[in-house]
Amino acid sequence: MSFFNKNSNDFRLRISIEGAQNLAVADANGLSDPYAVLLIDNKKYGKTTVNKKTLHPVWNLHTNIPLHFDKPHHLIEIFVWDKDRLRDAKFKDIIKVNKEVIGDDFLGKISIPVGQLFDLVNPSGRALEYDSPQNEDVILTLEKRNHQDNVSGELLLRFGIIKGPDSGNRDVAKFWEDYINQ
Ligand SMILES: [Ca+2]
């Protein structure tokens, strides 16, 4: 039997938003200025830089998320947006445009229940260490919020567990199983 001291676990979930490909066109120049935002249970955990004038951004944003048994995470969401450069517009132009134009354009999202995360890399759903040789990039199709959204393309991610100095020899897969089934 294995039972962790639930007050002293020291595992983190590392999520890398590597980039995206074949994104929708949001701007008149036939390109977009994409960036992505990582949310977990509606809390913002990371935001990439804006890649200007491309449909194939490379971001490489790495975020390490502490995993605590007393505050389990449930839903990972990544939103992709097109940045619109308001700063370059003159004030008289800004007051002319309507709200629809001012807001950044939605380019797609993905939602992953935390308990199903490792199903994406592993048929067994068994958790892997981030640097494990068995770990690999995951390509996920971007989804719409509603049928009017102009969405295309895929998001490139890598994720895995990283062990902190206090995690000792504890098994990553067993830790994750306990974490999601608590
Ligand atoms: Ca733009």
Image: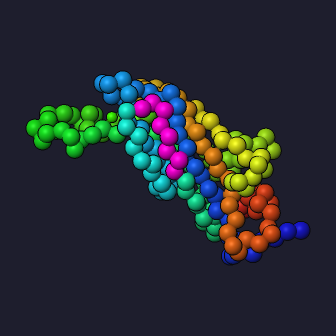
Q: Is residue 128 located in the magenta-colored stretch of the structure?
A: no
Question: Which residue is rendered at x = 55% and y = 54% of the image?
Answer: 62
Depth order, front residue of 87/115 = 87
Can residue 119 be seen?
A: no
Q: Quadrant of ligand 1?
A: top left
Residue 136's x, y, as percent?
Answer: 70, 43
Depth order, front residue of 163/141 = 163
Quarter holding the C terminus is bottom right
Residue 25's x, y, as percent?
Answer: 40, 26
Q: Which residue is outermost to the left?
A: 92
Residue 142's x, y, as percent?
Answer: 53, 33
Question: Which residue is rendered at x = 68% and y = 61% of the image?
Answer: 162
Q: Which residues lie in the magenta part? A: 54-61
Question: Which residue is rendered at x = 50% and y = 40% of the image?
Answer: 58
Quarter holding the N terminus is bottom right
Q: Answer left or right for 62 relative to 138.
A: left
Depth order, front residue of 105/35 = 35
Q: Is residue 58 located in the magenta-colored stretch of the structure?
A: yes
